Image (cartoon, coloured by chain):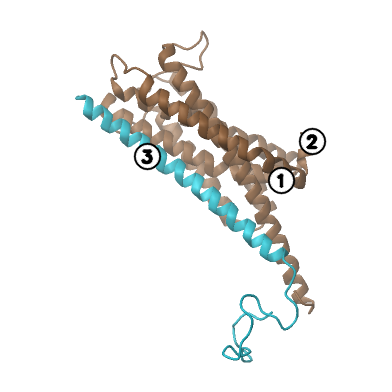
Protein backbone atom coordinates (compact mmCIF):
# COMPACT_ATOMS: atom_id res chain seq x y z
CA UNK A 1 0.00 0.00 0.00
CA UNK A 2 2.83 2.40 0.92
CA UNK A 3 4.62 1.46 -2.36
CA UNK A 4 1.50 2.60 -4.27
CA UNK A 5 1.65 6.02 -2.59
CA UNK A 6 4.17 6.99 -5.29
CA UNK A 7 2.18 8.45 -8.26
CA UNK A 8 4.38 6.75 -10.89
CA UNK A 9 4.00 3.33 -9.23
CA UNK A 10 0.28 4.01 -8.80
CA UNK A 11 -0.06 4.78 -12.54
CA UNK A 12 1.59 1.46 -13.43
CA UNK A 13 -0.55 -0.47 -10.92
CA UNK A 14 -3.81 1.20 -12.01
CA UNK A 15 -2.95 0.70 -15.68
CA UNK A 16 -2.53 -3.04 -15.08
CA UNK A 17 -5.61 -3.47 -12.86
CA UNK A 18 -8.07 -1.22 -14.71
CA UNK A 19 -8.89 -3.48 -17.72
CA UNK A 20 -9.58 -6.47 -15.42
CA UNK A 21 -11.71 -4.33 -13.09
CA UNK A 22 -13.70 -2.91 -16.02
CA UNK A 23 -14.23 -6.40 -17.48
CA UNK A 24 -15.36 -7.77 -14.09
CA UNK A 25 -17.74 -4.81 -13.69
CA UNK A 26 -19.24 -5.35 -17.17
CA UNK A 27 -19.66 -9.12 -16.61
CA UNK A 28 -21.23 -8.76 -13.16
CA UNK A 29 -23.50 -5.96 -14.44
CA UNK A 30 -24.72 -8.22 -17.26
CA UNK A 31 -25.45 -11.05 -14.78
CA UNK A 32 -27.04 -8.60 -12.33
CA UNK A 33 -29.36 -7.12 -14.98
CA UNK A 34 -30.39 -10.61 -16.12
CA UNK A 35 -31.20 -11.61 -12.53
CA UNK A 36 -32.96 -8.30 -11.78
CA UNK A 37 -35.09 -8.01 -14.93
CA UNK A 38 -35.76 -11.66 -15.84
CA UNK A 39 -35.06 -14.11 -13.01
CA UNK A 40 -36.34 -12.23 -9.92
CA UNK A 41 -40.08 -12.76 -9.31
CA UNK A 42 -42.53 -9.83 -9.03
CA UNK A 43 -43.36 -8.80 -5.46
CA UNK A 44 -46.79 -9.79 -4.12
CA UNK A 45 -47.55 -6.15 -3.20
CA UNK A 46 -45.30 -4.03 -5.43
CA UNK A 47 -45.64 -6.17 -8.57
CA UNK A 48 -42.99 -5.58 -11.27
CA UNK A 49 -42.08 -2.17 -9.78
CA UNK A 50 -39.92 -4.00 -7.23
CA UNK A 51 -37.30 -4.34 -10.01
CA UNK A 52 -36.45 -0.63 -9.52
CA UNK A 53 -35.09 -1.62 -6.10
CA UNK A 54 -32.22 -3.56 -7.75
CA UNK A 55 -30.98 -0.27 -9.21
CA UNK A 56 -32.02 2.12 -6.45
CA UNK A 57 -30.51 0.34 -3.42
CA UNK A 58 -26.99 -0.31 -4.85
CA UNK A 59 -26.91 3.30 -6.12
CA UNK A 60 -27.75 4.51 -2.59
CA UNK A 61 -25.00 2.32 -1.06
CA UNK A 62 -22.48 3.61 -3.61
CA UNK A 63 -23.49 7.22 -2.94
CA UNK A 64 -22.57 6.70 0.73
CA UNK A 65 -19.44 4.63 -0.06
CA UNK A 66 -17.98 7.24 -2.43
CA UNK A 67 -18.52 9.97 0.16
CA UNK A 68 -16.78 7.79 2.77
CA UNK A 69 -13.84 7.32 0.36
CA UNK A 70 -13.74 11.11 -0.07
CA UNK A 71 -13.75 11.61 3.71
CA UNK A 72 -10.85 9.13 4.18
CA UNK A 73 -8.95 10.85 1.37
CA UNK A 74 -9.67 14.23 2.99
CA UNK A 75 -7.98 12.98 6.19
CA UNK A 76 -5.02 11.89 4.00
CA UNK A 77 -4.88 15.39 2.52
CA UNK A 78 -5.09 17.28 5.80
CA UNK A 79 -2.93 14.97 7.98
CA UNK A 80 -0.27 13.61 5.59
CA UNK A 81 -0.69 16.15 2.74
CA UNK A 82 -0.30 13.32 0.27
CA UNK A 83 -0.90 14.26 -3.40
CA UNK A 84 -2.63 10.93 -4.13
CA UNK A 85 -5.17 11.67 -1.38
CA UNK A 86 -6.07 14.93 -3.18
CA UNK A 87 -6.36 13.04 -6.44
CA UNK A 88 -8.57 10.37 -4.85
CA UNK A 89 -10.87 13.04 -3.37
CA UNK A 90 -11.27 14.77 -6.71
CA UNK A 91 -11.85 11.57 -8.69
CA UNK A 92 -14.50 10.25 -6.25
CA UNK A 93 -16.74 13.34 -6.27
CA UNK A 94 -18.40 13.06 -9.73
CA UNK A 95 -18.90 9.30 -9.28
CA UNK A 96 -20.62 9.81 -5.93
CA UNK A 97 -22.75 12.62 -7.36
CA UNK A 98 -23.85 10.44 -10.29
CA UNK A 99 -24.84 7.52 -8.04
CA UNK A 100 -26.72 9.88 -5.69
CA UNK A 101 -28.62 11.25 -8.70
CA UNK A 102 -29.44 7.69 -9.85
CA UNK A 103 -30.66 6.93 -6.32
CA UNK A 104 -32.94 9.98 -6.22
CA UNK A 105 -34.35 9.58 -9.74
CA UNK A 106 -35.04 5.84 -9.40
CA UNK A 107 -36.48 6.37 -5.92
CA UNK A 108 -38.83 9.00 -7.31
CA UNK A 109 -39.88 6.65 -10.14
CA UNK A 110 -40.58 3.96 -7.52
CA UNK A 111 -42.39 6.39 -5.20
CA UNK A 112 -44.98 7.53 -7.75
CA UNK A 113 -46.65 4.10 -8.28
CA UNK A 114 -46.06 2.88 -4.69
CA UNK A 115 -46.62 5.98 -2.51
CA UNK A 116 -48.67 7.97 -5.02
CA UNK A 117 -46.15 10.84 -5.06
CA UNK A 118 -42.83 11.62 -6.74
CA UNK A 119 -41.37 13.28 -3.64
CA UNK A 120 -42.02 13.85 0.07
CA UNK A 121 -39.92 15.91 2.48
CA UNK A 122 -39.17 12.77 4.46
CA UNK A 123 -35.97 12.57 6.56
CA UNK A 124 -34.32 9.90 4.32
CA UNK A 125 -35.20 11.61 1.04
CA UNK A 126 -34.22 15.05 2.30
CA UNK A 127 -30.88 13.87 3.73
CA UNK A 128 -30.04 12.18 0.39
CA UNK A 129 -30.93 15.42 -1.41
CA UNK A 130 -28.57 17.24 1.00
CA UNK A 131 -25.91 14.64 0.07
CA UNK A 132 -26.38 15.47 -3.63
CA UNK A 133 -26.08 19.19 -2.85
CA UNK A 134 -22.88 18.46 -0.88
CA UNK A 135 -21.43 16.64 -3.89
CA UNK A 136 -22.42 19.57 -6.15
CA UNK A 137 -20.80 22.06 -3.74
CA UNK A 138 -17.60 20.01 -3.63
CA UNK A 139 -17.47 19.78 -7.45
CA UNK A 140 -18.05 23.53 -7.67
CA UNK A 141 -15.24 24.19 -5.18
CA UNK A 142 -12.82 22.02 -7.18
CA UNK A 143 -13.76 23.99 -10.30
CA UNK A 144 -13.41 27.37 -8.57
CA UNK A 145 -9.92 27.10 -7.08
CA UNK A 146 -7.26 26.77 -9.77
CA UNK A 147 -4.28 25.83 -7.59
CA UNK A 148 -4.74 22.07 -6.85
CA UNK A 149 -3.17 22.01 -3.35
CA UNK A 150 -5.26 24.94 -2.09
CA UNK A 151 -8.39 23.46 -3.64
CA UNK A 152 -7.66 20.06 -2.05
CA UNK A 153 -7.36 21.54 1.45
CA UNK A 154 -10.56 23.58 1.09
CA UNK A 155 -12.44 20.58 -0.32
CA UNK A 156 -11.07 18.31 2.43
CA UNK A 157 -12.47 20.61 5.14
CA UNK A 158 -15.85 20.85 3.38
CA UNK A 159 -15.93 17.06 2.89
CA UNK A 160 -15.23 16.35 6.56
CA UNK A 161 -17.87 18.88 7.67
CA UNK A 162 -20.35 17.28 5.28
CA UNK A 163 -19.55 13.78 6.57
CA UNK A 164 -21.92 14.45 9.47
CA UNK A 165 -24.73 13.86 6.93
CA UNK A 166 -23.68 10.23 6.25
CA UNK A 167 -24.91 8.72 9.56
CA UNK A 168 -28.02 10.92 9.23
CA UNK A 169 -28.76 9.34 5.82
CA UNK A 170 -28.16 5.83 7.16
CA UNK A 171 -30.07 6.10 10.45
CA UNK A 172 -32.76 8.64 9.48
CA UNK A 173 -35.26 5.79 9.01
CA UNK A 174 -34.59 4.61 12.60
CA UNK A 175 -34.38 8.03 14.28
CA UNK A 176 -37.52 9.53 12.73
CA UNK A 177 -40.92 8.25 11.67
CA UNK A 178 -40.37 8.27 7.91
CA UNK A 179 -42.41 7.23 4.88
CA UNK A 180 -39.26 5.53 3.56
CA UNK A 181 -39.07 1.95 4.81
CA UNK A 182 -36.34 0.98 7.31
CA UNK A 183 -33.22 -0.98 6.34
CA UNK A 184 -34.00 -4.50 5.14
CA UNK A 185 -30.54 -5.78 4.13
CA UNK A 186 -27.82 -4.12 6.25
CA UNK A 187 -29.49 -4.55 9.64
CA UNK A 188 -28.95 -6.29 12.96
CA UNK A 189 -30.62 -9.70 12.74
CA UNK A 190 -29.91 -10.21 9.03
CA UNK A 191 -31.78 -9.36 5.83
CA UNK A 192 -35.58 -9.56 5.74
CA UNK A 193 -35.71 -9.94 1.95
CA UNK A 194 -36.48 -13.30 0.33
CA UNK A 195 -33.34 -14.91 -1.20
CA UNK A 196 -34.96 -14.81 -4.67
CA UNK A 197 -34.73 -10.99 -4.46
CA UNK A 198 -31.68 -10.72 -2.22
CA UNK A 199 -29.31 -12.41 -4.69
CA UNK A 200 -30.08 -10.09 -7.65
CA UNK A 201 -29.67 -7.15 -5.28
CA UNK A 202 -26.29 -8.36 -4.02
CA UNK A 203 -25.01 -9.11 -7.55
CA UNK A 204 -26.07 -5.63 -8.69
CA UNK A 205 -24.35 -4.14 -5.62
CA UNK A 206 -21.11 -6.00 -6.48
CA UNK A 207 -21.40 -4.82 -10.12
CA UNK A 208 -21.94 -1.18 -9.08
CA UNK A 209 -19.03 -1.38 -6.61
CA UNK A 210 -16.67 -2.77 -9.28
CA UNK A 211 -17.85 -0.09 -11.74
CA UNK A 212 -17.32 2.66 -9.17
CA UNK A 213 -13.82 1.38 -8.31
CA UNK A 214 -12.91 1.18 -12.02
CA UNK A 215 -14.18 4.73 -12.58
CA UNK A 216 -12.32 5.93 -9.48
CA UNK A 217 -9.01 4.41 -10.60
CA UNK A 218 -9.52 5.79 -14.10
CA UNK A 219 -10.39 9.22 -12.70
CA UNK A 220 -7.28 9.19 -10.50
CA UNK A 221 -5.06 8.32 -13.48
CA UNK A 222 -6.63 11.11 -15.54
CA UNK A 223 -6.17 13.62 -12.71
CA UNK A 224 -2.49 12.67 -12.33
CA UNK A 225 -2.03 13.24 -16.09
CA UNK A 226 -3.86 16.59 -15.81
CA UNK A 227 -1.46 17.68 -13.05
CA UNK A 228 1.58 16.58 -15.06
CA UNK A 229 0.29 18.67 -18.00
CA UNK A 230 -0.21 21.64 -15.69
CA UNK A 231 3.33 21.31 -14.30
CA UNK A 232 4.82 21.08 -17.81
CA UNK A 233 2.90 24.18 -18.94
CA UNK A 234 4.02 26.15 -15.87
CA UNK A 235 7.66 25.12 -16.49
CA UNK A 236 7.35 26.06 -20.18
CA UNK A 237 5.88 29.45 -19.25
CA UNK A 238 8.73 30.06 -16.76
CA UNK A 239 11.30 29.20 -19.44
CA UNK A 240 9.59 31.63 -21.83
CA UNK A 241 9.68 34.33 -19.13
CA UNK A 242 13.44 33.83 -18.78
CA UNK A 243 13.80 34.18 -22.56
CA UNK A 244 14.76 30.56 -23.22
CA UNK A 245 12.97 28.56 -25.96
CA UNK A 246 9.94 26.61 -24.60
CA UNK B 1 -52.37 -0.37 -11.68
CA UNK B 2 -51.83 -2.49 -14.81
CA UNK B 3 -48.74 -4.59 -15.34
CA UNK B 4 -47.84 -2.43 -18.35
CA UNK B 5 -47.83 0.69 -16.16
CA UNK B 6 -45.53 -1.05 -13.66
CA UNK B 7 -43.15 -1.98 -16.50
CA UNK B 8 -43.26 1.61 -17.79
CA UNK B 9 -41.91 2.87 -14.42
CA UNK B 10 -39.28 0.09 -14.39
CA UNK B 11 -38.19 0.98 -17.95
CA UNK B 12 -38.00 4.69 -17.07
CA UNK B 13 -35.88 3.97 -13.98
CA UNK B 14 -33.43 1.71 -15.87
CA UNK B 15 -33.24 4.21 -18.77
CA UNK B 16 -32.44 7.03 -16.32
CA UNK B 17 -29.77 4.89 -14.65
CA UNK B 18 -28.27 3.98 -18.02
CA UNK B 19 -28.16 7.64 -19.14
CA UNK B 20 -26.52 8.91 -15.93
CA UNK B 21 -23.98 6.08 -15.51
CA UNK B 22 -23.38 5.95 -19.29
CA UNK B 23 -22.61 9.67 -19.33
CA UNK B 24 -20.19 9.18 -16.43
CA UNK B 25 -18.37 6.33 -18.21
CA UNK B 26 -18.21 8.17 -21.58
CA UNK B 27 -16.91 11.33 -19.89
CA UNK B 28 -14.25 9.29 -18.04
CA UNK B 29 -13.07 7.61 -21.27
CA UNK B 30 -12.99 10.83 -23.34
CA UNK B 31 -11.30 12.85 -20.58
CA UNK B 32 -8.61 10.18 -20.10
CA UNK B 33 -7.95 10.07 -23.84
CA UNK B 34 -7.76 13.88 -24.10
CA UNK B 35 -5.28 14.16 -21.20
CA UNK B 36 -3.11 11.32 -22.58
CA UNK B 37 -2.96 13.02 -26.01
CA UNK B 38 -2.16 16.43 -24.54
CA UNK B 39 0.64 15.00 -22.40
CA UNK B 40 2.04 13.03 -25.34
CA UNK B 41 2.07 16.23 -27.44
CA UNK B 42 3.86 18.17 -24.69
CA UNK B 43 6.41 15.39 -24.15
CA UNK B 44 7.14 14.94 -27.88
CA UNK B 45 10.57 16.29 -28.88
CA UNK B 46 10.33 19.62 -30.72
CA UNK B 47 10.55 19.33 -34.53
CA UNK B 48 13.90 20.25 -36.10
CA UNK B 49 14.45 23.93 -36.75
CA UNK B 50 12.84 24.98 -40.06
CA UNK B 51 10.44 22.00 -40.18
CA UNK B 52 6.69 22.21 -39.52
CA UNK B 53 4.37 19.62 -38.10
CA UNK B 54 2.11 17.98 -40.71
CA UNK B 55 2.72 18.21 -44.46
CA UNK B 56 6.03 19.55 -45.72
CA UNK B 57 6.09 23.20 -46.71
CA UNK B 58 5.40 23.86 -50.39
CA UNK B 59 5.70 27.06 -52.43
CA UNK B 60 1.88 27.38 -52.13
CA UNK B 61 2.15 27.75 -48.33
CA UNK B 62 4.75 30.44 -47.68
CA UNK B 63 6.34 31.25 -44.35
CA UNK B 64 3.87 33.09 -42.08
CA UNK B 65 4.20 36.83 -42.18
CA UNK B 66 5.60 38.71 -39.20
CA UNK B 67 2.89 39.13 -36.55
CA UNK B 68 0.88 36.19 -37.91
CA UNK B 69 -0.87 34.02 -35.31
CA UNK B 70 -0.08 30.88 -37.32
CA UNK B 71 1.84 28.29 -35.27
CA UNK B 72 5.59 28.39 -35.73
CA UNK B 73 8.00 25.50 -35.17
For residue A2, which numbered disc appears in the image?
2
Q: Give the position of the C terminus of chain B as an image quadrant.
A: bottom right
Q: Are marks 2 and 3 on the same chain?
A: no
Chain given the colour cyan: B
Q: Quadrant of the N terminus of chain B?
A: top left
Q: Position of residue A88 (x, y in %)?
A: 65, 42
The tag on residue A11 is 1
Kindly state the secondary structure of the residue where label 2 is placed.
loop
Numbered disc total: 3
Residue lying at 56% horizontally and 90% vertically, measured from the top left = B60
Residue A164 seen in render: no
Chain coloured brown: which letter?
Answer: A
Residue at x-position 57% and y-position 51% = A141
At horizontal 35% and vertical 34% (from top left) the residue drawn is B13
Q: CA distance from mark 2 to mark 3?
A: 40 Å
**Same subunit: marks 1 and 3:** no
Amino acid sequence: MIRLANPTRFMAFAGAVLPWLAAAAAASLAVGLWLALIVAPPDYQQGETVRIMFLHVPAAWLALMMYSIMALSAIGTLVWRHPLADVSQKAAAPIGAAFTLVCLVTGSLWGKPMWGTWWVWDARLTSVLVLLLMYCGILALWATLEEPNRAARAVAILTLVGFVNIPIVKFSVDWWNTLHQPASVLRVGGPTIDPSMLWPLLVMAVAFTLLALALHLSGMRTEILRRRIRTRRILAAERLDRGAPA
Amino acid sequence: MSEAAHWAYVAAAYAAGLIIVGALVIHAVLDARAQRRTLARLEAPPPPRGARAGTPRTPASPTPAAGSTEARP
